[in-house]
Amino acid sequence: MTAINLLAIDTSTRRSVLVLLTRAGGVRVPALVRDDDPKHGRMLVKDAIDLLKSAGLKLRDLDVIGVGLGPGSYTGLRIGLTAVKMWSYVAGTPVVSFDSLEAVARGVASRESRVSVVADAQRQDLYVADFARAPETSAFDRLGPTRIMSAEEWSRVVEPGTLVLGPASARARRLVPHAHFAEDPALDLPSAPGMITLSLAAWAESRFEDVARLEPNYFRRSAAEDKADAAAV
């Protein structure tokens, strides 16, 4: 494990997930998961500072900050990215990013061979990211980019035995009875190991973000924005 101080956060769902990796022996401080509360964004900064304090660290001690860019909740992603930008400006810390759905998939046990991660894209659509286990390495490989699909189309292409995870897994249960699902709802969230692994990979490859230009992966405008534009015409 690379010896750096890394704070990784994801706010793409209705729960904010934070995890800290420290230089001291590569210790991972357990992820903090705020309860399913629409006001969880108000506690994000406090949660992050408390997490750092628990390891005897301050913002300026971080080597890098990792942030999930979605797809997912428009409001949650804005809140998380605003906080990360503030921390980066204040402490001069570089920022790397990761795909939130891939961070979910990275938390899957090795016995699973195929995973489809889904999140609600509204308008009868889903955000989808598919992964398969590579037999020679046991690592997950992407089967394509994260994308938007109609829920009906997605249900037709999911292979039997696929593990379905993600914030929209409850909705997916009604669509794909031939798939299987995690018993632990925590597995539907971005995982601490996944967030750390993806952030470390970006850091090792110097894929640092231009913080001033960094935006979430929305894939399309929100329904509220389209409605506002239509009303203005």
Image (spheres, rainbow, N blue to C red):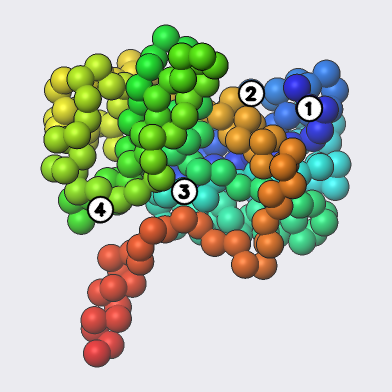
Q: Is residue 12 left or right of residue 198?
A: left
The circle on residue 122 is: 4
Q: Look at 60% across and 41% down and name the residue there.
A: 9
Q: Measure the C-alpha gap from mark 1 to mark 3.
A: 25 Å
Q: Look at 52% across and 50% down and name the residue there.
A: 69
Q: Measure the C-alpha gap from mark 3 to mark 4.
A: 14 Å
- The residue at which mark 3 appears reads as 70
Near-viewer residue (102 or 31): 102
**Mark 3 or 4 closer to N-term?**
3
**Mark 2 or 3 closer to N-term?**
2
- The residue at which mark 2 appears reads as 30
**Mark 1 or 3 closer to N-term?**
1
Residue 21 visible (yes or no): yes
Q: Position of residue 223 (x, y in %)?
A: 28, 65
184 relative to 213, above or below: above
- The residue at which mark 1 appears reads as 2
Circle 1 packing at 10 Å, graded few (<14), some (14-19), many (20+), is few
Q: Look at 85% across and 47% down and name the residue there.
A: 60
Q: Position of residue 168 (x, y in %)?
A: 29, 37
